[in-house]
Amino acid sequence: MKIAMVSEHASPLAVVGEVDAGGQNVHVAALASALALRGHRVDVYTRRDHPDLPPSAPLRDGVMVHHLDAGPAEHIAKDELLPHMPQFTQQLQAALEHSQPGVLHGHFWMSGLACTQVAASLDISLVQTFHALGSVKRRLQGAADTSPEQRIALERDVAERADRVIASCTDEKRELVRMGADSARVDIVPSGVDCDWFVPDGPRAPRTARPRLLVVGRLVPRKGVDDAITALQWIEDAELVIAGGPNADDIRHDAEARRLAALADELGVADRVHLIGQVPHTELTSLIRSAELMLCLPWYEPFGIVPLEAMACGIPVVGAAVGGLLDTVVDGVTGALLPPRRPRAVAATVTALLGDEPRRRAYGRAGRARALKYTWDQVARSTERSYLRAVMSRRPEAELVAAEQSGGLL
């Protein structure tokens, strides 16, 4: 099947960890690759954010990434991209008129805006994944939310017009239904993890004699990194390694990194907090394996790939009981789940686990077993089922029967 994916701000070719480059980039790249391995052809359309990018570039065999012109060819924060989406939509329509995919899959709400218009114009089946919802962001951030004012209304319209909507976790499906989506058209398909790369055995990054706590992810307030730093003042002797953001040479210029460093200094734990910047993918597994515990403390997380990566490496997760972590991390089995924004509770839980190696080992084994349920091949199979349902909703019954008998749907 020919599949067109649209991910306007999150290119699968981007360096993960930089501004606006995180879980969505990983998800689009890994899902497209897994679908290609299953015999599909995938074209991913994203915005050109650098003048040197070619019109198209391969991600792997069967996956081509196309750069569409929409606004200046430079980085623009995703919350400022809406005025450029009409141009993006025009370019997308021209591309799909030529390629004629069997299904269109939008990633993020602004991609959904483009996709609903193009799908209606070209009569293409449409599947939409939001990755994050404006209603939740507005509720949690209030005046600090930088999303366009019309985001929530536009998301509701995209959810109504898509043939199928994919939610990444149970909590997201509930939120989609609350905002008016038809529950019967919402499929839960989680993100995944490469269990052949993220494994318990292998090299470990150099470390001190202190117990190591690890945080991995973009340096944005909603990730709760400040809660991890705050908790450290009540955790005796442990060090906290924070990986993410700009590279190590530039991180001292990053506003959020400076805020976190100032907090560590204020709390008297600066000597035990290490902001190491962006870590190459090739080095991430050894860093994860070097830690006793992975801390994932967001107060909003639509899914969260990092907990799965830690579990696949056999490292227990101490996480906030929000979003996708409620589905992936099993409290008392693969780690611990706590209410968000409770650093004292984090400190007590971490202290208990650092003093109980047998329990950490048991959590690590259980985490690895659970991560094996989230392979990208399994995610691709579930996504295929959503594609099939989307196609079925647009095709006459007689045509569907003939297609199913000939194996022509997927």
Image (spheres, rainbow, N blue to C red):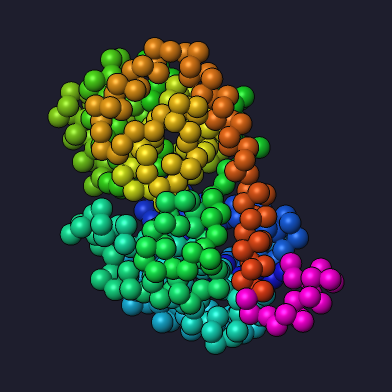
> Residue 343's spot in the image, x, y percent?
25, 30
Instruction: Pick out the residue farthest to the left.
Output: 266
Q: Can I make out residue 205 in this image?
A: no
Q: Residue at x 48, y 77 (%)?
A: 161
Q: Residue at x 59, y 85 (%)?
A: 122
Q: Residue at x 35, y 22 (%)?
A: 350
Tell me the quarter of the image containing the N terminus.
Answer: bottom right
> Residue 404's spot in the image, x, y percent?
79, 70
- Position of 42 compared to 131: left or right? right
- Position of 45 compared to 16: left or right? right
> Residue 382's spot in the image, x, y percent?
63, 55
Is residue 408 covered in magenta?
yes
Is residue 66 covered in magenta?
no
Picture quadrant where residue 72 is located? bottom left
> Residue 168's spot in the image, x, y percent?
49, 53
Out of 342 and 35, give the one closest to the viewer: 342
Tell me the quarter of the image containing the C terminus.
Answer: bottom right
Task: Decide: is 97 above or below 29.
Answer: below
Q: Residue at x 14, y 29 (%)?
A: 266
Task: Decide: is 26 above or below 384.
Answer: above
- Position of 201 compared to 293: left or right? right
Question: What span is in magenta?
Answer: 393-410
Out of 410 and 49, give the one closest to the viewer: 410
Instruction: Pick out the residue farthest to the bottom.
Output: 121
Q: Can I make out residue 320 in this image?
A: yes
